Image (cartoon, coloured by chain):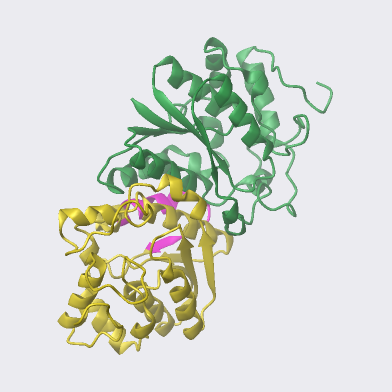
Chain colours: A green, B yellow
Amino acid sequence: MKAKLILSGGMDSTTLLYLLKSRGVEVEALTFDYGQRHRKEIAVAAAIAKVASVPHRVVDISTLNPFLGNSSQTNPAIPVPEGRYDEESMKATVVPNRNMIFLAVAVAAAISDKADAVYYGAHAGDHTIYPDCRPAFVGAMRRALKLCDWHKVRLCAPFLKKTKGDIAALGYILKVPFHLTWTCYKGMEKHCGKCGACNERKGAFAKAGLLDPVPYEEAQ
Amino acid sequence: MKAKLILSGGMDSTTLLYLLKSRGVEVEALTFDYGQRHRKEIAVAAAIAKVASVPHRVVDISTLNPFLGNSSQTNPAIPVPEGRYDEESMKATVVPNRNMIFLAVAVAAAISDKADAVYYGAHAGDHTIYPDCRPAFVGAMRRALKLCDWHKVRLCAPFLKKTKGDIAALGYILKVPFHLTWTCYKGMEKHCGKCGACNERKGAFAKAGLLDPVPYEEAQ
């Protein structure tokens, strides 16, 4: 099977990359440059793809930034909220329709290369604040994908019902280089340890009973 | 009502612009630069928006060109086929997943600006060769749009069951500046009169009993 994977350089999409590799899927990783604050993830994704020996392309959609304006991740004027993912304040991190844009482009690439599927790492922990990670959204996109071209591309989100703790545990089995992954929304030198993304990551490793190999700004 | 309109500068989306204006919709027109061969349509769309006194933005996604490779409209190595729209050869003009990408970005813009709807000019004549103009595709995207963000955006394609002849007739009533519109896939100085798009346009005006005001390369 031939597939495109949306690789952000975070622990979920990196684990998904290693899962696909373990199953012998011929995968190309795509990372989106949308002018994100945590643009460090682009270099991280490239490094991970290199270590995993899979082809990787950066999709430059940074010109779309003015159309993705009301998020802390695309507008430097909006601060990154600190706290837990399930808090209302965390909605400031939602980038309008980001996943539909990513999926639409990944599907175009899949159609062009006659690939069979597009994978993305949406998981159960995302659902509270990210509307475009919900199973119902994935279902609707799946139907749209069956109709958008004469060449059919399947949309696969195998972590949709998994928690981030499950993903950490699976990644450990798959020997995912978690030390290379980047999760923090702030994009500083080290992970901040205080934003929603950092808190969720720390919780996931704790739940899986594993040590998180990345250093944090704050004392742990 | 506040809406975004995908304006290609062709007769369908231009007629839709004038229809929305006639109904008092507060509309912003978006035109996509995807490195298309017939890029003349970008300047044409800007001129039409100016004449219609509506705000207009060009969405530069030309960096996506390598992901939209197998079409005569994005790959200069593939010639534009001549003939009728319903011929198999015309599938060379299909740009992989183009409409899903356009809609996804227009919806992001609509969410960012708290607009109510996104309009696009898909019509009944497109269905034979363009999978992403079919009513079933529009229905699937409509469902996905209800789920992709907390702010709901409606997808409206009021010409979905209209022929291009119907659109020409409607445009005449609405005083659409058809002389400014651009349809031809080849993007030369004048309309070629031989490609599928030109043939469909000529047929539409003939069916509506109207004179097409644009000059053609070939003798009419």
| Residue B89 position in % (x across, y down) | 19, 54
Q: Give the residue drawn at x 43%, y 66%.
A: B39
B69 and B27: which is toward the camera:
B69
B14 and B3: which is toward the camera:
B14
A8 and B21: which is toward the camera:
A8
Q: Is residue A177 magenta?
A: no
**Residue B56 in view here:** yes
Q: What is the quadrant of residue B133 in the picture?
A: bottom left
| Residue B47 position in % (x across, y down) | 48, 80
| Residue B220 position in % (x across, y down) | 19, 82
B144 and B84: which is toward the camera:
B84
Q: Give the residue drawn at x 17%, y 87%.
A: B209
Relative to A34, is B25 above or below? below
- Report the magenta residues as a range: B138-155
Q: Is A25 situated left or right of B88 in this image?
A: right
Q: Give the residue drawn at x 62%, y 36%.
A: A42
Relative to A111, is B218 above or below? below
**Number of callouts:** 0
**Residue B7 in view here:** no
Q: What is the quadrant of residue B188 in the picture?
A: bottom left
Q: Is residue B150 magenta?
A: yes
Q: Is A216 situated left or right of B54 in this image?
A: right
